[in-house]
Image (cartoon, grey):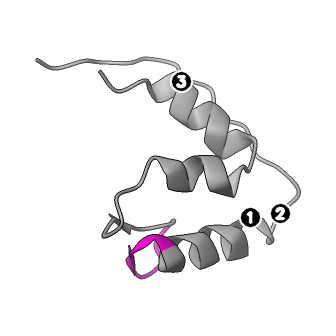
Amino acid sequence: MFDARAFLVRIDRMDVPALLADLAEDARITVGNGKPLVGRDAAEKGISDFYSSFAGLRHRILNEWSVG
């Protein structure tokens, strides 16, 4: 089952290699309202560029729903 808390910890640590480890080679992600990033190389550049625009971030889960 997907662990949202662990995923957000990796995001908040701004740990690009850890995030990339979760992605398939042909992954397609969108950061914010940007254009889709296709593949790990594009994801690495896009996420790194995104992280370079601020000093840090923090997520806090208020509610979580699981289906299935």
Q: Secondary structure at mark 3?
A: helix
**In contact (CB < 8 Å): disc 2 and disc 1:** yes
Tell me the distance, in whole angstroms, between the alpha carbons under discs 3 and 2.
22 Å
Label located before the other in sequence (3 or 2): 3
Disc 2 packing (10 Å; few <14; some 14–19; many ≥20): few
Q: Is residue 10 above or below residue 19?
A: above
Instruction: Say the numbered circle drawn on residue 54.
Output: 2
Label located before the other in sequence (1 or 3): 3
Q: Report the residue at 79% width, 71% height from top.
A: 53
Q: Viewer-proximal residue, 38 or 56?
A: 38
Residue 32 relative to residue 36: left or right: right
Residue type (three-letter) at the residue carrying disc 2: Phe
The quadrant in which residue 68 appears is top left
Residue receiving disc 1: 51
| Majority secondary structure in the magenta region | loop
Tell me the distance, in whole angstroms, between the alpha carbons under discs 1 and 3.
19 Å
- Furthest toward the right, the residue is 55
Q: How many marks?
A: 3
**Residue 62 percent across, percent down from the top left:** 52, 19
The residues colored magenta run: 32-40
Tell me the distance, in whole angstroms, between the alpha carbons under discs 2 and 1.
6 Å
Q: Report the residue at 45% width, 28% height from top.
A: 4
Instruction: Say the numbered circle drawn on residue 5.
Output: 3
